[in-house]
Image (cartoon, rainbow, N blue to C red):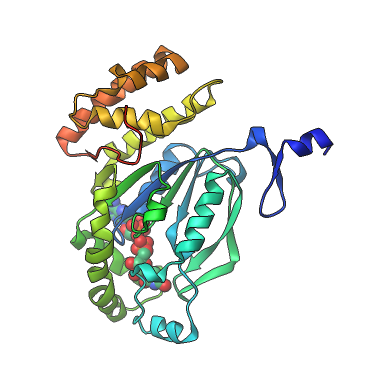
């Protein structure tokens, strides 16, 4: 690499270098919800519908990360408890908040990061199977408590809450934990009653109020998923235009405001015209159509919108 290129490059934590032109600051979407509500299935469907799932990891525009990679390492005494189903994995203290925050910040700065996968059978992080997260345009970060920590919550440009009723969640968790996570029925039910259910009520459920979009029925709600997919697709197309705002936050806020019933129909407001002049009438019209669609879907109970308090209002 010659000196000119060196000046234009950023060194990543693993020593790789990227030119500034390649550095992407992604749009960060948080996906919260109770255990087995369908968070990972929703993310998987989004990835599939966007044609990202079958793509090589280095080429993906959209990536999905699980909060499980940020469980903190247990002490030997805690490990013994965990093996007996007596460790509370649903309490905020079970997570490494600092590492989660620092990693998301690196991702937001366009860095490539390596995170461990999580092994539910041994209740521990698997450093031998690290996941490489390459810079992307959109990053989905899913987990039970992704909206719990204020510092982390504030990093999201958009917050989704997967809202599936607790009977359905329990009915899904039991077979999943037995078949995929190596547990027996007694242990699953004891852990659920002792820790999972009370912690959901105390720590997870109250974070629903921070969501911008609530998805009732999780992955069954194909209408809501199509809507989010279309939105990400529009963002990705919009971002690839030369001279575009590259700002999904502004784009989203305008549309969500359009649904808040405050009369601030985004496409007609000042912000809408800014975007229209940046991107041409195609995008402008798409936003208008999308706003109308969102209103109709909200009325049908497929999605619930909250005004995004995190974003600047016009
Ligand atoms: N809509 C659905 N219908 C049937 N099973 C589902 C549905 N959504 C998820 N599941 C199943 O329920 C379990 C939990 O789903 P998952 O997406 O892993 O939830 P979470 O990530 O919220 O814990 C998995 O076994 C998954 O295959
Ligand atoms: O070692 C562990 C770590 C976590 N859990 C449980 O997992 C869920 C969170 O994952 P979801 O995919 O959102 O269900 C949480 O409720 C923990 O209780 C575990 O059982 N063992």
- As drawn, is 213 to the left or to the right of 134? left
| Residue that extends furthest to the right in the rendered view of this protein | 2
Q: Is 16 situated above or below 311?
A: below
Q: Nearer the viewer, residue 193 or 174?
A: 193
Q: Nearer the viewer, residue 21 or 167?
A: 21
Tell me where residue 116 sits by quadrant. bottom right
The image quadrant of residue 192 is bottom left
Horizontal relation, residue 189 to residue 41: left or right: left
Q: Residue at position x 19%, y 35% from top?
A: 298
Residue 17 rendering spot, x and y as whole percentages: 71, 44
Direction from residue 55 to residue 183 in the image, left or right:
left
Residue 125 placement, left or right of 257: right
Quadrant of the frame with the N terminus: top right
Q: Residue placed at 56% from the left, 44% from the top?
A: 109
Measured as percent of width and height from the top left, residue 275 is found at: 41, 20
**Residue at 45% of width from left, 30% of height from top?**
247
**Does residue 222 show up?**
yes
Q: How many marks?
A: 0
Looking at the rendered image, the quarter that the C terminus falls into is top left
Residue 43 position within the rendered picture, expressed as x and y whole percent measured from the top left: 40, 47
Closest to the observer, 107 or 126: 107
Residue 251 sits in quarter: top left
Q: Position of residue 152 (x, y in %)?
A: 41, 54
Q: Is residue 173 above or below residue 276?
A: below
**Residue 181, visible in the rendered structure:** no
**246 w.r.t. 311: above or below:** above
Of the four image quadrants, the one with ligand 1 is bottom left
């Amino acid at each position: 690499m010659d000196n000119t290129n060196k000046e234009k490059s950023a060194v990543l934590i693993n020593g790789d270098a990227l030119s500034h032109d390649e550095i992407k600051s992604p749009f960060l979407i948080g996906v919260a919800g109770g255990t087995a509500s369908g968070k990972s299935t929703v993310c998987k469907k989004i990835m599939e519908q966007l044609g990202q799932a079958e793509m090589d990891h280095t080429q993906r525009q959209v990536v999905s990360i699980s909060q499980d990679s940020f469980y903190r390492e247990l002490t030997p005494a805690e490990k013994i408890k965990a093996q007996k189903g007596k460790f509370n994995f649903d309490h905020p203290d079970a997570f490494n908040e600092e590492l989660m925050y620092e990693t998301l910040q690196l991702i937001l700065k366009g860095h490539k990061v390596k995170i461990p996968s999580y092994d539910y059978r041994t209740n521990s992080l698997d450093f031998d199977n690290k996941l490489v997260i390459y810079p992307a345009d959109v990053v989905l970060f899913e987990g039970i408590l992704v909206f719990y920590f204020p510092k982390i919550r504030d990093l999201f440009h958009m917050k989704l809450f997967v809202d599936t009723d607790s009977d359905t969640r329990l009915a899904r968790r039991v077979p999943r934990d037995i078949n995929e996570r190596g547990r027996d029925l007694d242990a699953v039910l004891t852990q659920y009653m002792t820790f999972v259910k009370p912690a959901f009520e105390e720590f997870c459920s109250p974070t629903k109020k921070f969501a911008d979009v609530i998805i009732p029925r999780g992955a069954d709600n194909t209408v809501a998923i199509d809507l989010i997919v279309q939105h990400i697709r529009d963002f990705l197309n919009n971002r690839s235009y030369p001279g575009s705002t590259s700002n999904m936050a502004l784009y989203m806020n305008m549309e969500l405001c359009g649904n808040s019933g405050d009369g601030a129909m985004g496409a007609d407001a000042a912000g809408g015209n800014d975007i229209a002049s940046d991107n041409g009438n195609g995008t402008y019209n798409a936003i208008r159509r999308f706003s109308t669609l969102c209103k109709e879907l909200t009325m049908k109970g497929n999605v619930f919108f909250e005004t995004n308090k995190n974003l600047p209002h016009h």
